[in-house]
Image: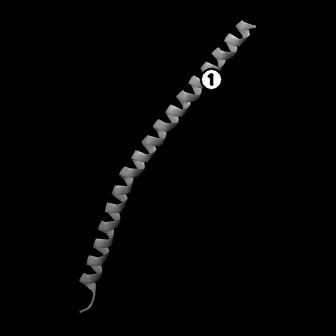
Amino acid sequence: MKTMQAEYRSDLATLAKDIADRNTEAAERNARAVDRMARWGWWQIGIAIAAIGLATGLILHFMPA
């Protein structure tokens, strides 16, 4: 009986380690995704500001006086 309990505990410990490893991998993937989104967000804002400035400049330049 003690042998079965030891095997059961060993299996539970292995399962817990596997779950912890998967959680760690998922957290790392999420961190990388958030980092990518944060960096791309700044580029998108910069491009939007430049496009608005260019459009405003063209409108003011070609607007009849």
Identify the colour scheme used: one colour
- Given the current orientation, which residue lies at the most extreme bottom position? 65
- Given the current orientation, which residue lies at the most extreme front position? 2
Could you say where residue 42 lies in the image, as x and y percent from the top left? Answer: 34, 56
Could you say where residue 6 lies in the image, as x and y percent from the top left? Answer: 67, 11
- Residue at the (61%, 19%) spot, across then down: 13
Could you say where residue 16 lies in the image, as x and y percent from the top left? Answer: 60, 25
Q: Tell me: 11 left or right of 47.
A: right
| Of the pair 17 and 4, the residue shown nearer to us | 4
- Residue at the (52%, 36%) spot, across then down: 26
Name which quarter of the figure residue 9 lies in: top right
Q: Tell me: 25 left or right of 65.
A: right
* Pointer 1 residue: 15
Could you say where residue 23 lies in the image, as x and y percent from the top left? Answer: 54, 33
Point out the image quarter for the N terminus.
Answer: top right
Name which quarter of the figure residue 4 lies in: top right
Q: Three-letter amino acid code at disc 1?
A: Leu
- Residue at the (31%, 61%) spot, across then down: 46
Number of other residues with Cα within 10 Å of mark 1, as a class: few under 14, some 14 to 19, many 20 or more: few
Above or below, 41 against 23 in this view is below
